[in-house]
Image (cartoon, rainbow, N blue to C red):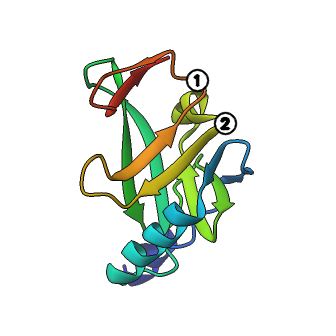
Amino acid sequence: MIASRRKKNTDTPTGFRVGDERLIKLTESAGKKVGSLLTRQGRPQGVLRVAVIGGGCSGLQYKMDLQDAPANRDILVESAGIKVIVDPKSALYVTGSELDFVEALQNGGFKVNNPNAATSCSCGESFSA
């Protein structure tokens, strides 16, 4: 029984692809912030997942999450010293994007500069393509 559990262990995923910064790029500021968040969570070798989901005022919104490793079919990009993963469906929307981090009291935080966004809402949290 224990042997069969070990076979099903997916700690080392093999089904992801490697991409480059043409998919998504992090600024130095975003890389430093994500690195500090990963370290704070106790997973310095972790990855940043960037996804696009339905919702928000304009129809689509970004979702970012810190994870331990890529999943099957993910695309892995290294940028600013950070491993970024994007699922194939989200890749259609984020190709060519730059993720920045702005340290400011108002309108601070992570900002996605996406050349594919046809429109975005006034709050900057969602977009349409």
Residue 107 visible somewhere in the drawing: yes
User: Which of the pair 126/17 is nearer the observer?
Assistant: 126
**Mark nearer the N terminus (2 vs 1):** 2
Tag 2, which secondary structure?
A: loop
What residue lies at 53% left-to-right and 42% top-to-bottom?
Answer: 87
State which quadrant residue 119 falls in: top left
> Whole-percent x and y of residue 60?
37, 24
What residue is shown at x 52% (from left), y 34% (from top)?
90
- Drawn side of residue 94 relative to residue 48, left or right: right
User: In this picture, is 90 found above or below 109?
Assistant: above
Image coordinates of residue 116 in percent, x first then y, are: 58, 23
Measured as percent of width and height from the top left, residue 24 is found at 63, 46
Where is residue 44? Give x, y as percent.
47, 81
Instruction: Using the image, determine if residue 46 lies above or below residue 22.
Output: below
Up/down of 22 relative to 40, above or below: above
Q: Residue at x 32, y 52 (%)?
A: 108
Q: Which of 65 and 128 is in front in this view?
A: 128
Q: Which labelled disc corresponds to residue 116?
A: 1
- Name which residue type carries label 1: Asn
The residue at the far front in this view is: 105
Give the spatial CA distance, label 2 vs label 1.
Answer: 8 Å
- The residue at 25%/20% (across/down) is 57
Q: Which amino acid does label 2 sit on?
A: Gly
Which residue corresponds to mark 2?
A: 96
Tell me if mark 2 has few (under 14), some (14-19) or many (20+) residues whose alpha carbon lies within 10 angstroms of its own.
some
